[in-house]
Image (cartoon, rainbow, N blue to C red):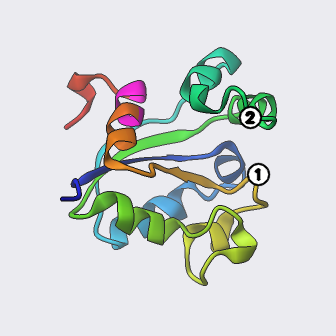
């Protein structure tokens, strides 16, 4: 059975390009309720903690540098079948392969600066949401 919560964050490129409001509007119009949201900046160390699973991958250092390059907007979202529905809304990691009308097709700069993160499982959604939000910040 799928869960009803997922985690997302609008990445530094989309925030810098002024797309946060449009992306949030798309999320809400797709039927997601925003449980928690804030604007913050990751330090390189904190980005490294979040992306620890990729530590041995060749792109890890560049990913941490990119994710700490400017403000992000992390959110916990709620909707039935949240993870799968949200992954559909954001589109393929590579915006060139993303479906028309998806967030990445509309707002991503490249495969590296792809505008938005979306959890890939119910388990990761809980872990990632708890990384950014305390229990008292999750409404």
Tag 2 secondary structure: loop
The picture places residue 59, in percent across and down from the top left corner, at 79, 37
Q: Residues within 10 Å of mark 2 (few under 14, many from 20)?
A: few
The picture places residue 121, in percent across and down from the top left corner, at 38, 50
Q: Residue furthest bottom?
A: 100
Q: Is residue 42 visible?
A: no
The relative height of residue 80 versus residue 37 in the rendered view (above or below) is below
The answer to which of 73 and 89 lies nearer the viewer is 89
Range of magenta residues: 128-132
Give the Cα distance between marks 1 and 2: 14 Å
Residue placed under numbered mark 1 in the picture: 112
Q: Residue furthest front?
A: 56
The relative height of residue 116 versus residue 73 in the rendered view (above or below) is below
The picture places residue 14, in percent across and down from the top left corner, at 66, 53
Identify the residue at image location x=63%, y=66%: 104
Identify the residue at image location x=47%, y=40%: 74
Identify the residue at image location x=19%, y=38%: 139
Identify the residue at image location x=64%, y=22%: 48
The answer to which of 28 and 51 lies nearer the viewer is 51
Which label's residue is closer to the chain start, 1 or 2?
2
Residue placed under numbered mark 2 in the picture: 57
Whether the magenta-drawn stretch holds residue 129 is answered as yes
């Amino acid at each position: 059975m799928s869960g009803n919560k997922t985690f997302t964050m609008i990445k530094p490129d989309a925030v810098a390009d002024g797309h946060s409001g449009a992306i949030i509007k798309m999320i809400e119009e797709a039927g997601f309720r925003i449980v928690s949201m804030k604007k913050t900046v990751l330090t390189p160390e904190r980005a490294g903690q979040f992306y620890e699973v990729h530590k041995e991958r060749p792109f890890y250092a560049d990913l941490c540098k990119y994710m700490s390059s400017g403000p992000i907007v992390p959110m916990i979202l709620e909707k039935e079948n949240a993870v799968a529905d949200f992954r559909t809304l954001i589109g393929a990691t590579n915006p060139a392969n993303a479906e028309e009308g998806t967030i990445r097709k509309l707002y991503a700069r490249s495969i590296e600066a792809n505008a938005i993160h979306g959890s890939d499982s119910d388990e990761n959604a809980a872990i990632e949401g708890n990384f950014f939000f305390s229990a008292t910040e999750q409404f």
